[in-house]
Amino acid sequence: MYNHIEGNIYTIPVPLPNNPLRCLNSYVIKDDKRSLVIDTGFRMPECLEAMTTGLNELDIDMNNADIFLTHLHSDHSGLAPDLASSSSHIFISRTDGEMLLDGLTNSWDRTAEFRTYGFSAEELSCWSDNPSQKYRQEKLATFTYIADGDILEYGGHRLQAISTPGHTPGHLCLYDRDNKIMFLGDHVLFNITPNITCWPNFPDPLGHYVHSLMDISIYDIRLPLPAHRQVTSTVAERVGTIIEHHGARIRELLDVLDVNPGSSTYELAGKMTWRVHGKTNSWADFPLTQKWFAVGEAAAHLEYLLARNRVRRELDGTIWRYYSV
Ligand SMILES: [Zn+2]
């Protein structure tokens, strides 16, 4: 199935089973000469079925289509090599493309890093169940790298790539200035807050993210197109709300740290409030897949505070323990 957005722009809803994001909005710019597919879904049968059905119904032949990946996450990039024809370009930023390929060749084992957050050996042994591992690309893709300011032209749309590091180190949005359309990827989502986590070789992800939010808020956007869920406000309003949200999380983290000095990232995350599927969950009921995200997010907030000398940390064996300054 697909939905018509306007003109020659369509969206294919791609289900994401057992994932709080529920669904990916894959966008298609349809053109007789060459079409563009933006983001693809996990490499799992339900996603492949939705994509191939949608593309067939839209009469898109992948021999005459390219793929643009807003970022490396497997719910966006997982199916790209399976959908691409031998003539399809798969566009992505160099930063995210190289990380993806590095992950495929070197198994992207980040258990050592997550051990420093305070995960138990038992939890770390389940690392391969992490959705980033399970549903990622399997074939080695050949990417065409896109940089900030590059222009792609499809179906009468001039699309400018805008570098928006934060959600991933190399996240890109696409902006159609003439029609004031922004393909947002996961940079700005409306009903959910984009996950911000820590990355190897990408210090202070939350600081980058807040900068990238400010960057995007100065564009004139009539039609924002996020990769998940619906649009419920203007981008500028949503940017304000997201920045406020992170401010509140940082204040909560500092409050928790004040009464629990010497806690690990895992322990701090366990004392913060989290909402999954619209309800507040206790840490004990938290599924492990969500703990990876929650602890990663707490780690990103701690890194923000560390970079600004608002907290300090000490290594206790293999675990970092945090203190207020
Ligand atoms: Zn994402």
Image: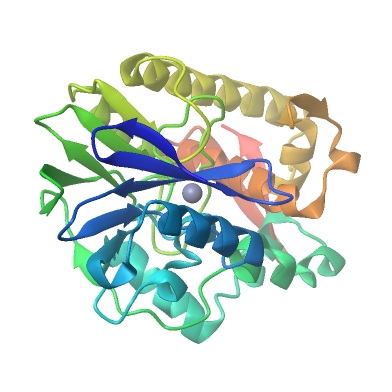
Q: Between residues 215 and 247, which one lies in front from this camera angle? A: 215
Residue 210 visible at all: no
The residue positioned 60% from the left and 75% from the top of the image is 109
Q: Between residues 54 and 263, which one lies in front from this camera angle? A: 54
Q: Going by the image, does 210 lie left or right of 181?
A: right
Q: Quadrant location of the C terminus?
A: top right
Residue 215: x and y in percent read 23, 31
Residue 169: x and y in percent read 37, 54
The residue positioned 36% from the left and 72% from the top of the image is 84
The residue positioned 42% from the left and 68% from the top of the image is 80
> Image height check: is 128 above or below 234?
below
Residue 64: x and y in percent read 24, 67
The residue positioned 46% from the left and 75% from the top of the image is 82
Q: Between residues 53 and 291, which one lies in front from this camera angle? A: 53
**Coloring scheme used:** rainbow
Residue 5 visible at all: yes
Q: Residue furthest right?
A: 284
Query: Total number of numbered labels?
Result: 0
Q: Quadrant of residue 237?
A: top left
Residue 66: x and y in percent read 26, 64
